[in-house]
Image (tube, helix red, strand yellow):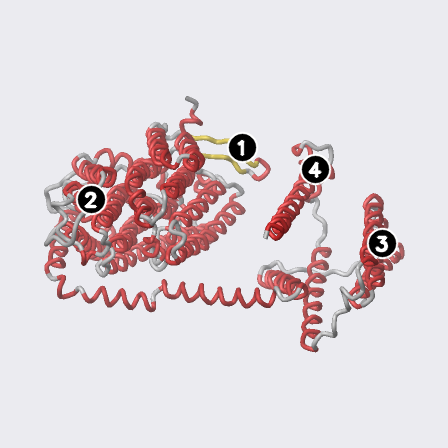
Amino acid sequence: MPEVLRVLAPLVVALLGTLLVAVLGSLRPRVAAPLAVASAAMALVAALAMPAGASVDLSWAPTWGLRLSFAADGLARLYALLATGIGLAVLVYAAGYMPRHLAHAGHGPERAVRLYSLILLFMTAMLGLVLAQDLVLLIVFWDLTAITSYFLIGYEQEEEESRQAALTALLVTGISAILLILAGVILFVHHGTASIPAILARSEAGPIATASGVLIAVAALAKSAQVPLHFWLPRAMVAPTPVSAYLHSAAMVAAGVFLLGRVHPLIALSPPLRDGLVVVGFASMAVGGGLALAQVVLKRLLAYSTVAQYGYVVVLLGLGEVAGAAFYILAHALVKSALFMAAGAVTEATGQEQLDRLGGLGRALPGLAVGSGLAAAGLAGLPLTAGFFKDEVFFAGAAARGGPIPILAVAGAALTFAYTWRFWAGIFLGARRGTVQPLPLALTAPVLLLGLLVALGGIVPAVGARLAAAAGESMALEATPLALAYHLDRHAPNLMAVTTWALGMVAIVTAARWARVPRAIAAIGERYGPDRSMLVAIDTLTRFSRRLRAFEVQSLQRRIATILVSAAILVGATIVLAPPWPTFTLGDLPASDWPLVLFLVLAALAGLLATRSAGRATLVLALSAVGYSLAAVFTFIGAPDVALVAVLIETMMTVLLLGVLSLVPRDVAEPPSEPEPRDRYRSRAVGFVAAAFAFVVSWSALSWSAPDATMASAHIDLAPAAHADDVVTAILADFRGLDTLGEITVIAIALLGVLTFFVSEKST
């Protein structure tokens, strides 16, 4: 198999699977789940078969220096395995979960087709993101993950809470994505290339590296739900459990820390930025861990846990422990996806989603208890699980930095121990509450399998260590060996782990004394936190938008005024705030140009007459005078062909307008009444602002001397690339032809709408 196919095989398989599930599933809904599972399995096999270090580099937009560049480096292979492997487990789980979930809501099996296809589409976007080696490609797939997650989070589209959660996630991740685009523009302009490896190799410490690194970091931290942009993640828990198990453990939230890893050499050039990541990471650990202790809804508890756990990863990246961060991501994906699926299975079996209404389910659901128990042990960092080593690399990095970092690390890990015990023990231990319905194998097998993988990672950590070391080498651009083994001695990570367990046990035993504290903090956060601020901001912007629309749609004049004034303000602000400022020069006016000036003045006077005319014939003649005057202008500036076309068009339009207006009864279109003084003054102000804006922009543009290498010469040189003999042919055939096709399409759709309206009216 050619190397290009081996590198792109997971991406192609996932994309084809998306299309097959969407098309065939719409015809036969019952085949959607098997097709989705088979597609994910094939994508996983393709990801396992990707040759390490292989790459694909094809020309995309050569004039811009853009290429279809993909590479299966260590970081890409790690995330590709997570996206396809966890995706396969989630789709198997969804095959058993969705029929029951839809039956509870009163929907048919055809509704599940959309979820399966969207999960595969997100898998496609994630694979494209991690394989991309070009900034433009990376941004495209980054935005595709945001759009797909919007539809997945808002899957229950009939529910207001679901729609709000999807919109919140889209706003936070979408608006922050603009910062990523801005960083990409800065790096592209500064380095002259969109190749990520080339940019990282050429970057040097300085304002450019710091500014672009900060912009990228903010976009990544928003995607990974880090404080203070974490609030969208708990709200997203209204989505079905398969969505939470995939997006919020191993896919969407992981994309943020992936981006930090991909550009880590750029971030490493700015020590203050790295320290900022450490601060944000510890803040997320504290906020996420503390709020997880206050939650009673199972999935919200796990959501805040995800905020805290990715805080660990951000801290590791800030400390420069890239291989440790990669291993932490791997272990967390296995653990958290299993726990999310366990929470959904428990809700399906009992009908309850609140922790204080559950308990004693260990005997009724033994497979689920064992699988989720192994995952919980991994999250708590207990020995003989992969979680033990994720905590070990974290403690080792914290101990190497010294200062208050080790203390904060132990405190955060103790919080993890406490809320993990609260989650698992609250479900499976204690007295039995309520009735339990039997669960299909599809709801328990993925949880048990992932739990066994967590245990296997603690017994044989070498496999995960090799994957993490390869990913770390891709992030650091140098070898980052990672040796994981048990050490029965008193080195710092062991002492910190024992201290964590001891503090966690103390927290569990004394829970009754401090349980009210995180609940009070959570209540304050709900009232005054960033989530509330976001809702207020959205409500304010919505009310402003409605008022502006109400003003704009009252008349054509107001709509035009809104556009012109907004354009004037934006361009004016750009002129003032973005140097170099425009220069204005006054050239000579030779005698040969006076006829040209005469016709320009005539066109202006005819335009003014058209605005003041009350008679129909006078209005048409004034408008035609504008057109004929401009046709004369074209003649004076050496474009007789354009002038001839303008004369023909103006003649046809004048005759047509006069003929149509002669057929319209006089009482149909009476002259407008005299406007109110306030409207008259407002119209004059808008006209003045628009005219001043156009005058300043035109004078400024004409004052710049023509450069030697103009865009016109570039167009002439590129005409053969457009399969045209000259520029005019290329413009008319390609751009104008496409524009006309778009206009025809719009008119056709409008006519179909009118025809449908008349048919429906006639039938009624």
Q: Is residue 396 visible?
A: no
Question: Disc 2, disc 4: CB below 8 Å?
Answer: no
Mark 2 or 3, nearer chain start: 2
Residue 135, given in percent of the width and then of the height, sits at 48, 42
> In this picture, is 763 found above or below 600?
above
Element type at mark 3:
helix
Mark 2: which amino acid?
Answer: Ala
Query: Which residue is found at the position 13% from the left and 41% from the top?
Result: 487
Residue 708, given in percent of the width and then of the height, sits at 70, 44
Q: Distance between the Cα atoms at labels 4 and 3?
A: 27 Å
Residue in the foreground of this view, choosing between 589 and 6: 6
Mark 1 or 3, nearer chain start: 1
Which residue is denoted by mark 2 in the rendering? 375
Query: Which residue is found at the position 62% from the left and 58% from the top?
Result: 580
Query: Which residue is found at the position 78% from the left and 66% from the top?
Result: 667
Q: Dot 4: within a 10 Å radius of its alpha carbon, few (fewer than 14), some, or many (20 or more) residues? A: some
Element type at mark 4:
helix
Residue in the foreground of this view, choosing between 570 and 193: 570
Q: Which mark is residue 733?
A: 4
Mark 3: which amino acid?
Answer: Tyr
> In this picture, is 656 found above or below 467?
below
Residue 694 lies left or right of residue 78; in this view the side is: right
> In this picture, is 379 found above or below 526?
above
Question: Disc 4, disc 1: CB below 8 Å?
Answer: no
How many marks can you see? 4
Which residue is denoted by mark 1 in the rendering? 59
